[in-house]
Image (cartoon, rainbow, N blue to C red):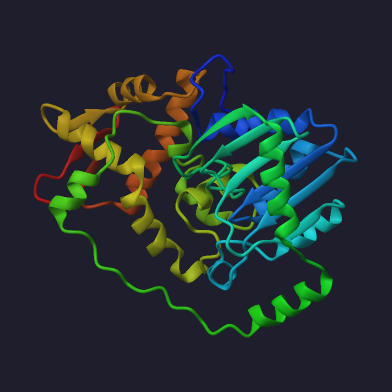
Amino acid sequence: MSDYQYPFSTERSSLLNTETFRNLLGSALENSSKSVIILSAYVKKIGVNWLKEKIGNKNIKCTIVTRWNKGDLAQGSSDLECYSLAKANGWSFKVLQDLHAKVMLVDNDNLFIGSPNLTGRGMSLVPVSNEELGIKVKALKEDLKIINQLVDDAAIVNDDIIKELEEWQKNLPKIEKPKIPSFPISVEDTFKEKFDKLWVNNFPWCEIKYLLNNLDKKEDNIAHDLELFGLLGIKNSDLEKDLKESFLQSKIFNWLIKRLQNEQNKEIYFGRLSSIIHDCLVDDPKPYRQDVKLLQANLYSYIKYLKPAQVNYDQPNVSEKLSLNINF
């Protein structure tokens, strides 16, 4: 399941969603033979690693330009390590501090323009990603002039600059995230997502006990779930508390609540929910029903372990049953 790839078609609207933008860009990078220019306000390690994976070991000229203002680096919006990754591949890494563009040019021909940054969320390289839009066009001579001018205006990053920035980063004061109060309930309800569609990536990919007992294992399923619930870098002592909080706010849990609310008796048995999940999944191709049941079992493991107040779990006979707690 961790090897699942979003398919794409070139016969479609010129406006590309996140996954299609990434896939078409990835295909262009794999077929590149001369040069790649990346203009991206934010750049993360996962994005540069993906870029390397797509370009491979080809000896082509690659230039990354990002903005790297102090707020980006202090708050982790961009990674200093991106320079070292680029250098290891023989690529040029530059900084233009007023850059806000997101432009990718391959072989001076394929031009990708849109909202995605070269980050995990921007390129849909992680389970919880942004809703981005972009287009792919053929680059014109005037386009090349504009892009090359931005590249020329950018400052070259070298080892000396990185050493100074690393020292600066070490001496940064601890930045406390402000605790911002929630929106009024009526506003939150208005803004809530419509829960009529699901992706495989919305589900946990392993049972909760397996996740908690194998945090140090380098497995795709574990990495997926830690990323899904925003638990990367969380200390073990805080993990269960943060996991429950993230699970209660997750799309899949809120989708489940909505489904229970729509049921006549506010309850649903395993088999019926399995059919509903299968019908709601928009992955193409859809997973087999057996895989859907595995995803569902993972979801149930969270319900049984975390015991959310909104949902009751029961197994009156053979089939498991979930019901909405009307007193909550």
Residue 33: horizontal and vertical position, in percent? 85, 32
Residue 228 can be seen, yes or no: yes
In front: 161, or 265?
Answer: 161
Residue 214 position in % (x across, y down): 59, 54
Residue name at image x 71 percent, y 43 percent: 145
Residue 73 figure quarter: bottom right
Residue 195, placed above or below residue 327: above
| 17 on left or right of 137 | left
Quick one: quadrant of the N terminus?
A: top right
Where in the figure is residue 27, as x and y percent of width and height?
70, 28
Quarter of the figure with residue 35: top right
| Residue 249 against residue 264 in the figure, above or below | below
Residue 270: image quadrant is top left
Q: Against 188, is 123 above or below?
A: above
Closest to the observer, 302 or 59: 59
The location of residue 274, given as percent across then percent down, is 35, 24
Q: In the rendered image, is residue 50 in sight?
A: no
